[in-house]
Amino acid sequence: MIQPERLHHLNGVDVRPGRYVLYWMQQAQRAGANHALEHAVRWANELRLPVLSVFGLTSRFPDAQIRHYAFMLEGLRETRSDLARRGIDLVMLPGPPPRAVERLAPDAALVVTDAGYLRVQREWRAAVAARAGRRVTAVESDVVVPVRLVSEKEEYAARTIRPRIHAHLDRFLVPLEEARPLRDSLGMVRGGLDVDDVDGTLARLAARRGAGRVASLRGGAREAARLLRRFVRGRLPRYARERSDPGTDLLSHLSPYLHFGQISPLAIALRVRSAKGVPGAAKEAFLEELIVRRELSMNFCAMNDAYDSYECLPQWAQRTLARHSRDRRPYRYTPADFERARTHDEYWNAAQQEMVATGTMHSYMRMYWGKKIVEWTDDPREAFRVALHLNNKYEMDGRDPNSYAGVAWCFGKHDRPWGERPVFGQVRWMSRAGLERKFDMDAYVRRVGKAVEAGSSTETRDSRRKR
């Protein structure tokens, strides 16, 4: 079922005669459990036309590094194959995505796309809607409940958005039926980049190479499905009790796949909800993170255009941090110190090393990591810039609404005032002693050390092969 609230007509143009229905794939980079794709297929079957899919590959996505492009292209290679089995061709064109769509739109009856909540994603869709000369419909495919149905304003915190989401869950937490196109588009359009040649495409991209590929991560829907099966069978039963422990690492590790749209949050939620022999508390704890917390971040980016700047913080947080901006810091580090993990705190260093080596960081440690950047930087605005830069550069799910909200949370976003203390004022503080009291931090440091060593060994083998 595609609920009508998922559909957003971006212009007033009617459906026109054409050779195909053009599906512009950008955020939801998968062939299954994709509401936007299914909407395109249904229109195509009604019009007795094929579906042609296009993806615009830009080397200028804000803050994206070579590691992000490699992971994304691995997924797109798989998606192209999956689409072909349904009779849908995927054409990948270089350059800004609106230009790619506009190249193929003149022969389309209408354009269907997925939804994106970041500024650049909204700008791309508005540009296509204004210039395509065809109806353009965006379909919310990467949230369980459509963002504007939940709220037309920026929500203050999880506690304010939770009842709004839960009011609609029963209607939206239902499987999506898939239809096969009546006509295929294979070979309809010539040209474009070779989706199967990941290394060759990477070589042609003038992308930032400061954060290299992560050998331990493989992009694609099949790998996402494998991780989901592993999580549900072995980790989910203990999730409610132990998810915060960075030493045991009971997380799903699905965030990179969610970020690139290689797996549907709806599909994850349905699989978790139907899991047999799993305590209800474990399911509820995970669905809270997947739906309420994640969709709070979508609300944040959709409703607050300053989501990537210090100005996104609530006024109380900005005031209290300003009042304490001249407080004595126990330690001071430069951006280079942070990036190279050269602090006095081995737990913080391990978190930074985990992010650089694996493209991910345990969620509890990401909170501690961000809080300590606030504590060890002279100016809170500079601390915000440093944390966002490092997160976006190294995290595979950086440049994502969840990441923007997560960094901002370290500075008071989606939180409440706490007791006054140096440096932080009324913004929540986290301590090294708190980590040691709750968790086996030596186990975490050992786990990260093994991951870093494994990554280094892989890089060495790869470099030898190239020579």
Image (cartoon, grey):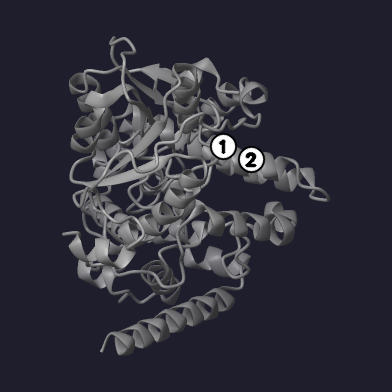
Q: Residues within 10 Å of mark 1 (few under 14, many from 20)?
A: many
Q: Is residue 33 visible?
A: yes
What is the quadrant of residue 33 in the picture? top right
What is the quadrant of residue 164 in the picture? top right
Rendered-image quadrant of the C terminus? bottom left
What is the spatial separation of the Cα atoms under label 2 and label 1, in whole angstroms?
8 Å
Q: Which residue is disc 2 drawn over?
A: 269
Rendered-image quadrant of the N terminus? top right
Vertical order, 164 against 460 (above or below): above
Q: Is residue 306 visible?
A: no
The total number of labels drawn is 2
Check disc 1 and give the amino acid type.
Ile
The one of 402 and 314 positioned closer to us in this rendering: 402
Element assignment for label 1? helix
Residue 323 spot, x, y in % from top left:
26, 43
Element assignment for label 2? helix
Check disc 2 and give the amino acid type.
Ala
Comparing marks 2 and 1, which lies closer to the viewer? Answer: 2
Residue at 35%, 53% in the rendered image: 422
For residue 165, side relative to residue 298 (left or right): right
Q: Residues within 10 Å of mark 2 (few under 14, many from 20)?
A: some
Residue 152 spot, x, y in % from top left:
41, 17
Residue at 50%, 56% in the rendered image: 363
Residue 82 spot, x, y in % from top left:
50, 48
The one of 421 and 400 positioned closer to us in this rendering: 400
- Numbered tag placed on residue 291 in the rendering: 1
The one of 371 and 76 positioned closer to us in this rendering: 76
For residue 34, side relative to residue 269 (left or right): left
Vertical order, 240 against 356 (above or below): above
- Numbered tag placed on residue 367 in the rendering: none
Residue 229 spot, x, y in % from top left:
67, 56
